[in-house]
């Protein structure tokens, strides 16, 4: 009987990195449709934001020298010389001893370096304003280029765009940006026992979870899933589906049929294509051991374990890693520090992704392992995230610090 030759988690990531040769093309996309896409170019600013000194309050534009030491008992008395209309250039400059009304967002007149908030002023008559409080230079204003400077690198290639980056692009008047094309990921479920959730289920069968799970994981990763349905454990049908997926997609995922059982056709199917190469068959990880990673010409195929939790763990750790690599995205993860709640013995010889729930107890975050088996999908739904336990460790102790990564 053939045994899997396991590689470690880090080795697997390195092998994937060293074998990727696929290039994702780029396209110009409107900033209204660019959320979660990855920038393919650096974006520099051609202008200052803002281009003029702006007030951040409703009040009077003044020179800070004129209101130095002002108080309610001894207010500064200034001459009102006009009003700035929002969206317009001030009607004039101001001189020493003068002020001009300015609304929030209005442009400061030359001669003013600060704005006195309306609450701390009093209008004595149409031409005279009393200022009851000093204001420091540059207080209550936004300076030229304070948001974005002309020539500044505002967004780096490889940035995954959030609503805030869309806002920055809008502020610069950039309405289209070059991003990597949405990666198309083909999803094939295999197994004679797997039936679509739309059908009545008979004893001995299981509903197809993985097509839906992988589809949603793809959406979460901002790539385009393409479903190829459930294919029975039949070499020709499976090969035909893989061929179609390879023709239409950038990456192909096959779920089920990755271990060494008699009906496990995945390896045979991949090997049947000219230009194929299998570089991983087995990762020292729990759940997810019987994983296959290979390629046909320059397109990667992942053979994911049929057990839903194993399938999800491999997607999140290795498929997502590959997707990051081909679109130049550097993922940053900020785990939550927690205290582990119990003594936990892990499976020997494999790193483990242990699902946990987090509870706050007396101001301390505690991580509780969720009971799980890789064939049970509900365990992850009950969990906040996971703790990664290194292969070399025997387990975790109650009271030790752990890092929890959100699912
Ligand atoms: N003798 C051994 N048996 C197994 C080993 C082993 O090392 N030696 N490894 C176990 C591990 S670990 C896993 S994980 C599974 C993975 O096996 P396969 O990838 O070959 O997957 P299948 O046998 O096709 O399916 C496993 C399990 O998952 C169910 N399944 C499959 N597809 C779906 C789907 N789309 N939705 C929901 N559930 C699915 C399937 O019915 C099986 O119950 O192998 C162990 N065995
Ligand atoms: O991939 Mo398996 O989960 O270790 O049952």
Image (tube, rainbow, N blue to C red):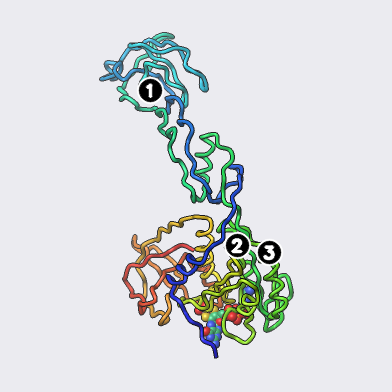
Left or right side of 180 for 336: left
- Where is 387 relative to 127, above or below? below
Q: CA distance from mark 1 to mark 3?
A: 64 Å
**Ligand 1 - quadrant of the structure image:** bottom right
Please tell me whether mark 1 sits on a helix, a strand or a loop: strand
Please state which of the two labelled residues, at mark 3 or mark 2, is closer to the viewer. 3
Specify few, some or many for label 1: CA neighbours under 10 Å numbering under 14, 14-19, or 20 or more.
many
Q: CA distance from mark 1 to mark 2?
A: 51 Å
Q: Which mark is residue 216?
A: 2
Please report whichever mark, 1 or 3, sits nearer to the chain's N-terminal start: 1
Who's the residue at 42% across and 31% down the image? 145
The answer to which of 332 and 250 lies nearer the viewer is 250
Rendered residue at 44%/17% (across/down)? 101
Camera-side residue of 270 and 179: 270
Image height of 354 relative to 102, above or below: below
Question: What residue is shown at x 46% (from left), y 65% (from top)?
Answer: 385
Which residue is tagged 3?
247
Q: Position of residue 322 (x, y in %)?
A: 52, 63
CB-based contact (under 8 Å), mark 1 and mark 2: no
Q: Which residue is mark 1?
A: 115
Q: Which mark is residue 41?
A: none
Q: Residues within 10 Å of mark 3 (few under 14, many from 20)?
A: few
Residue 392 screen position, x and y as percent: 36, 77
Residue 92: quadrant of the picture: top left
Q: Position of residue 158 (x, y in %)?
A: 49, 51
**Tag 2 or tag 3, which sits nearer the N-term?**
2
Q: Earlier in the sequence, mark 1 or mark 2?
A: 1
Taking the spot 40% from the left edge, 14% from the top edge, the residue there is: 123
């Amino acid at each position: 009987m053939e045994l899997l030759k396991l590689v470690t988690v880090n080795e697997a990531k390195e092998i994937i990195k060293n074998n990727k040769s696929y290039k994702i093309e780029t396209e110009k996309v409107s900033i209204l449709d660019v959320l979660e896409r990855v920038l393919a170019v650096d974006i520099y600013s051609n202008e200052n934001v803002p281009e003029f000194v702006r007030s951040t309050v409703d009040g009077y534009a003044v020179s800070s020298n004129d209101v130095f030491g002002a108080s309610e008992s001894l207010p500064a008395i200034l001459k009102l010389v006009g009003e700035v209309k929002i969206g317009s250039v001030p009607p004039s400059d101001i001189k020493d001893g003068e002020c001009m009304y300015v609304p929030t967002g209005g442009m400061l007149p030359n001669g003013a370096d600060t704005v006195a908030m309306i609450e701390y002023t009093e209008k004595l008559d149409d031409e005279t304003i009393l200022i009851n409080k000093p204001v420091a230079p540059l207080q209550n204003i936004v300076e030229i280029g304070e948001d974005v400077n002309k020539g500044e690198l505002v967004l780096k290639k490889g940035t995954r765009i959030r609503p805030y980056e869309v806002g920055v692009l809008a502020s610069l008047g950039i309405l289209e940006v070059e991003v990597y094309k949405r990666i198309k990921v083909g999803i094939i479920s295999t197994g004679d026992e797997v039936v679509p959730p739309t059908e009545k289920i008979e004893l001995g069968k299981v509903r197809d979870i993985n097509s839906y799970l992988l589809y949603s994981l793809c959406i979460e990763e901002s790539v385009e899933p393409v479903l190829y349905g459930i294919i029975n454990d039949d070499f020709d049908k499976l090969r035909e589906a893989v061929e179609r997926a390879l023709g239409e997609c950038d990456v192909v995922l096959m779920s089920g049929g990755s271990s060494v059982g008699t009906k496990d056709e995945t390896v045979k199917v991949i090997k049947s294509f000219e230009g194929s190469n299998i570089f991983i068959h087995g990762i020292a990880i729990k759940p997810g051991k019987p994983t296959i990673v290979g390629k046909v010409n320059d397109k990667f195929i992942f053979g994911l374990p049929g057990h839903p939790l194993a399938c999800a763990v491999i997607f999140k750790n290795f498929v997502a890693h590959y997707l990051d690599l081909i679109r130049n995205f550097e993922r940053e993860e900020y785990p939550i520090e927690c205290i582990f709640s119990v003594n936990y013995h892990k499976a020997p010889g494999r790193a483990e992704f242990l699902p946990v729930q987090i509870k706050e107890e007396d101001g301390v975050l505690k991580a509780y392992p969720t009971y799980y088996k890789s064939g049970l999908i509900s365990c992850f739904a009950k969990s906040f995230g996971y703790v990664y336990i290194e292969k070399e460790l025997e387990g975790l102790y109650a009271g030790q610090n752990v890092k929890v990564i959100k699912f």
